[in-house]
Amino acid sequence: MKIQLFCKNLDSYIEVEGGTTLGEIADSLSGRLTFRPICCRVNNKTEALGFPVYTPKLIEFQPRTEGSGPRVYTRSLCMMLYRAVCAVLPGTGLRIEHSLAHGYYCRLEGYDYVAPETVAALKEKIRDLQIADLPFEDRQGLTHEVIKIFEEQGLESKVRLLRTSRELYTRYTVLDGVSDSYYGALAPSTGHMDVFDLLPYKQGFLLMSFDPADPARPSQYVAQDKMYKAFTEYIRFNSITGVRNVGELNESVLHHESSSLINVTEALHEKALAHISDDIKERYDKGGARIVLISGPSSSGKTTTTKRLAIQLMTNFLKPQMISLDDYFVDRDKTPRDFTGDYDYESLYALDLVRFNADLTAILAGEEVELPSYNFEKGTREYKGKKLRLEEGSILLIEGIHGLNPKLTDSIPEDKKYRIYVSALTTLQIDDHNWVPTTDNRLLRRIIRDYKYRGTSAEETIRRWPSVRRGEEKWIFPYQENADAMFNSSLIFELGVMKDYAENILRAVPSDIPEYAEAYRLRKFLSYFLPIDLSRVPSTSLLREFLGGSSFRY
């Protein structure tokens, strides 16, 4: 039976036989497509190229560099790495823990140190797999049968997840006789992954995908030792709580242990802020740290972190006073624009740096300064008589995304500044081979907050997210290692709490728009979590900034 497909890449209809796979369709269009597809969006939902088409569809093939392509490429590399570990080090467990240093940090179970020659052997095996161009075989089986397969391979974290997901059937992938599972499409074959690298790093190694700026070469290593330390501390905490992955989190819910987990996790936040407060106090007493700059990417929880830190500083007999960088935005008609023509609010130069530095200098000199307020409706800065003067024992807290950028406060002596980087450095894993991206955690926070407090739909938040991410890559992430302290604002339990709220909002995204692909992916991601009742979360929790019910005023 012939069916009609509308191909967005060609802006025209094509006719194919029912049951033809997307890969076969891509091959038939090889002379008309300007790139080699790695996946395809079908009715705005990402599918692997092995997906067969039986009814009329809207299709859009995607290269590895755009849309869903980078995720598909990285997932496929991860499975190739797992296959390499099985071949080079039989019986050794692999943990792909989180993104770091422009790569993905990996550990081998039982290894406190991975020798360079071992990393080289793994890299050589991945290259052999790539040259062999082996297929990623997509399969489906009864969940209890898939559990048995994973048990035989020693994939305990996947077994835990499947036992708590309560699904009748489970999809999995086979590569060269080895089974694995990923929460999204993979490439059709290993030949697609021709750009990668493995680098020895700390106790493990880094898996490097292609460089977004130059896809012909691997990503270039960037030192992130402070970030590594922050991740490592939380991974250790996860091990102590016995919740290292989603399966173990779900088990805590099923065993009615989530309240205890919430209390312990919140206590860890409080302890971390107390430690930072003590460090600030010590520097303050020595004549420094008169200004605390609190920075971090979107939806990292900077505002609540600032308010909770202020309480801790008061217990150290300091008087915190606060300034928001948002009040120093230039008038909207002077705001720089990004390459799409949209206002670039993430740009450092969306702020009036001259006025800001003049005010800070005067405040540190003991002068009284009238502070501005930014009217977001009118897009103008206003003065309403709000004045500030630092008294004896006062300390100034400044919250905003550019706090770690040296150009923000270049007129202020370095010893007078204390910098804090705040981000949701998620250490919870879906399973040993699938991590929870920190960007997904923050995006879900923002979707809920924007919908609840700003009347913004999920589709609009998703649409703007790439612009936000570009701003973070340019204006925030390059400066994160400048921090004197890093505060990990993630909470082990938060995705379980956000699950129902986010899913309801995401379901409203129409299927006939491009943003549906991301909304569907996030819903699929959240489906692995069992829900946790928000009423168990204390009113002082950072999570309340996004879900409501906070005892702080925003």
Image (cartoon, grey):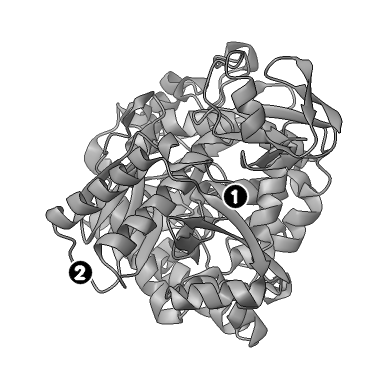
Of the residues tagged 2 and 1, which is closer to the observer? 1
* Front position in the image: 140 or 501: 140
Badge 1: residue crowd in 10 Å (few <14, some 14–19, many ≥20): some
State whether residue 220 appears in this view: yes
Q: Which residue is mark 2?
A: 112
* Front position in the image: 132 or 488: 132
Query: From the viewer's perspective, is residue 79 above or below residue 46?
Result: below
Residue under the point 64% across and 80% down: 253
* Front position in the image: 99 or 180: 180
Quarter of the rendering containing residue 316? bottom left
Q: Secondary structure at mark 2?
A: loop
Query: From the viewer's perspective, is residue 506 above or below residue 514?
Result: below
The disc labelled 1 sits on which kind of residue?
Answer: Gly
Circles 2 and 1, Cβ within 8 Å, touching? The answer is no
Q: Secondary structure at mark 1?
A: loop
Query: From the viewer's perspective, is residue 225 above or below residue 127?
Result: below
Quarter of the rendering containing residue 378? top right
Q: Position of residue 483 (x, y in %)?
A: 31, 46
Q: CA distance from mark 2 to mark 1?
A: 31 Å
Q: Position of residue 256 (x, y in %)?
A: 65, 86
Q: Position of residue 283 (x, y in %)?
A: 24, 55
Disc sitting over residue 494 in the figure: none
The disc labelled 2 sits on which kind of residue?
Answer: Asp
Mark positioned earlier in the residue sequence (2 or 1): 2
**Left or right, residue 368 beside residue 255:** left
Of all residues, the one furthest to the bottom in this rendering is: 255
Disc sitting over residue 184 in the figure: 1
Residue under the point 68% across and 43% down: 51
Residue under the point 61% across and 58% down: 139
User: How many numbered marks are there?
Assistant: 2
Badge 2: residue crowd in 10 Å (few <14, some 14–19, many ≥20): few
Q: Position of residue 75 (x, y in %)?
A: 48, 48
